[in-house]
Image (cartoon, grey):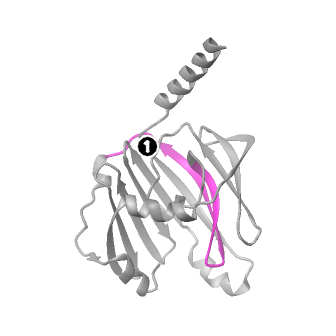
Amino acid sequence: MKQVLLSFLLLVTIKAATAQATGQISYKIDFSSDNPDMAMATSMMEGSTMELFFMAGKARADVKMGAFMDMSTITDSKSDKSLMLMSVMGQKMAVENKLSEADKEAAKNAPKAAITKETKEIIGFKCTKATIKTEDGKELVIWFTTELNASLAGLEQFANIGVNGVPLEFATEQNGMNVKFVATKFDKKVEEKVFSLTVPEGYTVVTPEELEKMGTL
């Protein structure tokens, strides 16, 4: 029995150690709504995409929401910092924050996902199906992989996923719209400069409270 247990622990350790820890994932984002009044808003979001970059202790998510908004979130666990860059209709804003504080806030509302035994392959990675029940009774489906080792702490798009892995296909609900992310491509090469926490020229640094007052969050 002890030998079986040791073999199992060794297998888990090897699998964790060999999980891809550096890479870039491209996602397409689809918006839809049952509300006819949201038809114009969803049409403005056509062509939306997300790029997820990661390496040891660092992550970045670049989201392009149609012609409406570009948003980047960069996190660094070692320095305990996060930087969010937003460009909305020509207005550029930056929010600097402690990663631990942002992660703690997200953890308060993080739901518990029910993990199933269903699996499928997405962009070459084995994914497991998980589901989350929303407050209004809807079921959100997540397909995640443990073959990628990425720290997603502080990335808003993954805040309410509730799984220990990297989601390659998942859905959320925001402001009456259903938002679905589907991974389309993986590249193992990432340049470290994409994780820079320096605020680019042309951006105005604001606090989270100031950004909320503007109605952006």
Residue toward you, 196 or 96: 96
Three-letter residue code for mark 1: Gly
Q: Is residue 173 one of those drawn in magenta?
A: yes
> The N terminus lies in which quarter of the figure?
top right
Q: Residue furthest front?
A: 2
Q: Which residue is mark 1?
A: 23
Residue 185 screen position, x and y as percent: 53, 47
Residue 109 screen position, x and y as percent: 57, 65
In screen coordinates, is 199 left or right of 100? left
Q: Which residues are magenta?
A: 167-191
Vertical order, 83 against 80 (above or below): below
Vertical order, 201 against 155 (above or below): below
Q: Residue at x 57, y 74 (%)?
A: 45
Q: Residue at x 59, y 16 (%)?
A: 7
Vertical order, 18 against 92 (above or below): above
Q: Is residue 51 one of those drawn in magenta?
A: no
Residue 183 screen position, x and y as percent: 58, 51
Which quadrant holds residue 87?
A: bottom left
| Secondary structure beneath label 1 | strand
